Amino acid sequence: MKVYFNNSCKICKAEIDLYKKEKIEQINWIDITNNQKARLETKKNYKELLRRLHVKKNGKIFSGAKAFLLVWKNIPKYKFLYLILKLPVIFQIFSLLYEIVALILYLKNRKQLKTN
């Protein structure tokens, strides 16, 4: 499984660094910053990659809240988040909150688009 994230976003980096500490061999962490290969692998433009977390698993791309569920499902320490947030009504609320936070982070980091 490949996880595409924005390493130049301080908040994104801090969160992903927590997950990386768990040293899960099945997860390949890919920084999207100035990474043309990430764009080709995901078939997403830089704006789309910057806007949300993406996961590629079994040839399929998952974005946003669904991507986070996959990450948490594969990290034993965080699997409880997957088990709670995958529940239908809770997932809808989680998805909405994720989109709000993701938009705020995107607006904060969109200056990166000008350099890429």
Image: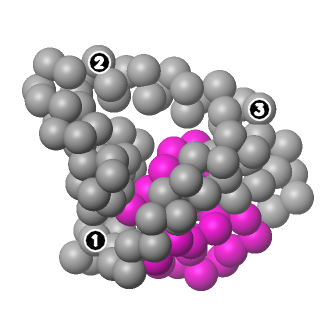
Residue 53 in picture, x, y percent from top left: 49, 50
Q: Which residue is label 1 attached to?
A: 57
The answer to whether residue 62 is seen in the rendering is no
Which residue is drawn at the image coordinates 88% and 58% (left, top)? 115
Magenta-colored span: 28-55
Q: Which residue is label 2 attached to?
A: 93
Mark 3 Cα within 10 Å, few/some/many (few <14, many 20+)?
Answer: few
Q: Which residue is label 3 attached to?
A: 108
Q: Earlier in the sequence, mark 1 or mark 3?
A: 1
Mark 2: which amino acid? Ile
Which residue is drawn at the image coordinates 67% and 52% (left, top)? 13
Mark 1 Cα within 10 Å, few/some/many (few <14, many 20+)?
Answer: some
Residue 91 in picture, x, y percent from top left: 22, 28
Mark 1: which amino acid? Lys
Q: Nearer the viewer, residue 17 or 99?
A: 17
Q: Judge whether 40 appears above or below 76 on screen.
A: below
